[in-house]
Amino acid sequence: MRDVAGMRRMRAGIFGLVAGIVLAAAAHAQVPDAAVPLPESDPCDVPGYLLFGEGTLDRIAKSIKEHKRLNILVVGSGSSVLPGPEGVARSYPGRLEDRLRQRFPQVAVKVGAVAKSRLTAGDMVESLERVLLEHKPDLVIWQTGTVDAMRGIDPESFRVALDEGVDLIEDSGADVILMNMQYSPRTETMISLGQYADIMRVVARDRGVPLFDRREIMRHWNDNGNFDLNLGTRDLAVAFKVHECLGRALASLIIEAAHLDEFKRGATQ
């Protein structure tokens, strides 16, 4: 007569041995070899849902294809230039220009800036027609919203000013990107920016123009530990890195919204 208990013990032992082998193999497959370095994450990475939308840039695509030219103008309240002798080249307009020149060496790319401090969107609209006539841009990047929030400008007045500004820019023959405010953990506790950021998002959607959501992009970098934005521009090294990333992200948005990769493929064929 067979030893039933012994057979059970044998089966249990075999089962345990097999399970142990399977678990060990799974663990070995999931843990990377320590001798193989993992790729470092790019601090400039931006999730696609934060960067790309439905807005298009049809006018600059035509200018590039027909004239091999791209004249971009940044307008807004507050300077977009960093301090120091390298401030112009290392600020986001300078990094944007450099990035686009690298991607499209056959195109004459120029990125300029016209900015004055403490201007609301309504204030900027008053001088916008003159600025457009003077600079004749193919694309305007309009950064606004912070001063309106600081002053508590009536939200409906802010929305109307945005619509009027987009009209002026498009009537001049240029494309437009709306850029909202910067993100700073300290600023967020002192100024109510959310409503104005939401208005910019709605206007961009309704007008079919791209929104560069600088506020949420910078929040993403801060929350993921890419940059400590509590330091702001007090740490110039951090400011340089943030502006480098902003320039790269803007270039990606422009290329996507204007379908410029198709132009590049056509130029190389």
Image (cartoon, rainbow, N blue to C red):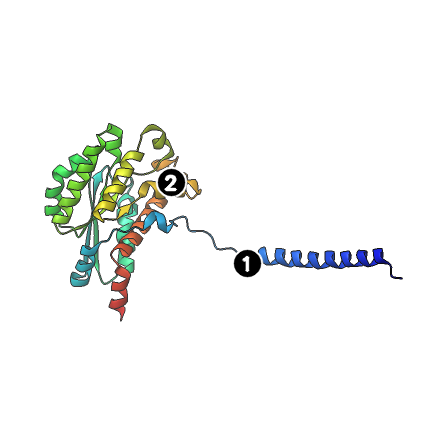
Labelled disc at residue 119: none
Quadrant of the rendered image containing residue 91 = top left
As drawn, 195 above or below 220: above
Q: Which residue is mark 1?
A: 36
Q: Nearer the viewer, residue 170 or 142?
A: 170
Disc 1 and disc 2 in contact, CB within 8 angstroms:
no
| In the image, farthest residue toward the right | 1
Disc 2: which residue: 219
> Could you tell me if residue 80 is visible in this image?
no
Residue furthest to the bottom in view is 269
Q: Is residue 179 left or right of residue 7?
A: left
* Quarter of the image where the N terminus is located: bottom right
The kind of secondary structure element at disc 1 is: loop
Q: Position of residue 190 (x, y in %)?
A: 33, 28
Residue drawn at x 31%, y 35% is 194
Please, what secondary structure does the residue beneath circle 2 have? Answer: helix
Instruction: Tell me where residue 100 appears, x and y as whole percent.
Output: 27, 56
Q: Quadrant of residue 196?
A: top left
The three-letter amino acid code for the residue at tag 2 is Arg
Q: Position of residue 114 (x, y in %)?
A: 18, 42
- Residue 126 appears left or right of 215: left
Label 1 crowd (10 A; few <14 / some 14-19 / many >=20)? few
Residue 54, visible in the rendered structure: yes
Q: Residue 149 at what x, y percent from top left?
A: 26, 31
Amino acid type of the residue tagged 1 in the rendering: Val
Tell how many labels. 2
First of labels 1, 2 by sequence position = 1
Q: CA distance from mark 1 to mark 2?
A: 32 Å
The residue lying at 48 percent from left, 55 percent from top is 39
- Residue under the point 21% across and 30% down: 154
151 to 94, vertically: above or below: above
- The C terminus - image quarter: bottom left
